[in-house]
Image (cartoon, grey):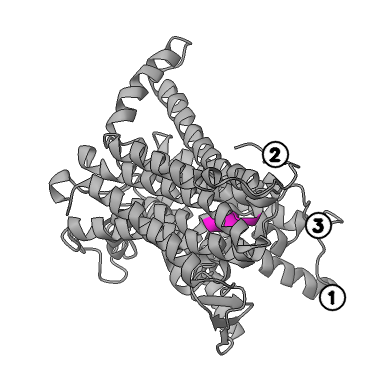
Amino acid sequence: MGTLRSSTRKRPARPPARRTAAGLGAALAVLAGAVLTPATASAHGLVGRADLPVPSWLFAWTASAILGVSFLALFALWKTPLLRDARTRALPRVPRILEVAAGIVGIGLFGVTVVAGFAGQQDFTANFAPTFVYVIFWVGIPVASVLLGDVFRPFNPWRAMARTTAYAISRVTRSPPRPLLKNGYPPRLGRWPAAVTIVCFAWLELVYPSRDDPRLLAILALVYASVQLAGMATTGIDAWTRNGDGFAVYFRFVSLLSPLGWRGRRPYLRWPLSGAPELDTVAGTTAVLCALLGTTSFDGFSNGDLWLEIAPSLQSFFQHFGFSAVGAFEVASTIGLLFWVGFATGLYLLGVRGMAAAVGGNVRELARSFAHTLIPIAVGYVLAHYISLLVLQGQAMAYLISDPLGHGTNYFGTADFLIDYNLISFSAIWYIQIAAIVGGHVGGLVLSHERGLVRFRSPEDSRRAQYWMLTVMVAFSCLALWILSAVSTTG
């Protein structure tokens, strides 16, 4: 995940017809390769092949056809920017007391997670911490953010701690505390800390063998909170939250797709997707989104037959250099994780470079300008991979809130609750997963088309550029379906 390189190529003359069709040709090539490749990977699904509603190859062709039709329909019917000028409707302001209460709840949940990690049973099924961190926090909050906007912001525990401390200091000194850095948040730092956070959390979840250790999660929670508080004290609370806090950045990105926006404590209604073009693309923004796509892709791929064939050879290779079996596995999986992050980044940059070659422009500037088009794709990937985890394992919170430490308490009378694994059928999960993938990519096409209308001088330039973005969308879609279709082999 390297720094985006710039290109100063001059705007070329109008390419011949065969060049304008290159994007569609490449898309078809990617599609054919993905469809003909045997399905050998899986995601966080609990689905077997016998439960597939229709053959997986048919899903791939159908999804690609939907993207193609959407592409043509956008250029036929959407001729002027609509999201940029979409109207909004303000709603009543939320009372300040509710924001304070949300911060208290956030700090309380953080405290319960830490206490459970240290003092509770060290069994992930009976301890509050693992399910809360991996299911509610990592998956549930993004889903809530798509529906309700940036709900994490008022509940953010370290932000609430920092704001409380700043308020106390201002009451004593009669002036608000200033960041330790005189010039505030360094622009060059951008959102690279957030990108690193996403990759590190994915490494913990997907690579580290003791990922479910409650005590480890409690320690890491305290370390992360300390880093966030130090960052806020150094660069400013809002500046660090907006750029350096990986989870806050991720959840805010997702909330830009929501029909409910927030300006301070005032909510307002808007068209879905219309918040995404407002994304400020500082350095590292594209890296955050590519990290989300890449790590989620590896999550699915690492459970498939192809990885199960490759991983032992990599593990054996590193054992020859003195690594233990566990250490060699960690190194091999780390390489796989970084490969998929790099692959997602390279696929996006390939489309951007093709766009720059077709209509001219700086590659880095174009990459940042179209970065927001990856948000719905990333959300689709996350929902497709984790929907079964959220629906099924999320039920465990019913008994964990009554017995968070696993010591036999029953605070809310729900300690005897049992997970209903028949709550949703396998076929329903599959339909949700497919809808998430296809819907995410159609959303990406819509945002790309809107940005093209704003960014390029003529409809012809926009159309030539969008051939390449269509290629990227089809490639990401087929990649997701290829990974998802092989849930059957290990699910």
> Residue 190: image x %, image y %?
71, 51
Q: Residue furthest bottom?
A: 92
Magenta-drawn segment: 369-373
Most frequent secondary structure within the magenta stretch: helix
* Residue at x-position 25% and y-position 45%: 57
Q: Where on the picture, by quarter, is residue 101?
A: bottom right
> Residue 468: image x %, image y %?
53, 48
Given residues 343 and 223, the one toward you in this image is 343
> Residue 244: image x %, image y %?
66, 53
Q: Residue furthest top?
A: 320
Q: Nearer the viewer, mark 2 or mark 3?
A: 2
Mark 3 element type: loop
Kind of residue sitting beneath label 1:
Arg
> What residue is pinned by disc 2?
5
> What residue is pinned by disc 3?
184
- Label 3: how many residues lie within 10 Å, few (<14), some (14-19) or many (20+)? some
Q: The C terminus appears in which quarter of the rendering?
A: top left
Mark 2 element type: loop
Q: Is residue 75 left or right of residue 46?
A: right
* Residue at x-position 50% and y-position 43%: 22
Per the model, the C-alpha gap separating discs 1 and 2 is: 47 Å
Q: Residue furthest right?
A: 182
Inspect this view and state whether residue 328 appears.
yes
Q: Residue furthest front?
A: 16
Which numbered disc, 1 or 3, marks the residue that appears first in the sequence? 1
Q: Is residue 320 above or below residue 380?
A: above
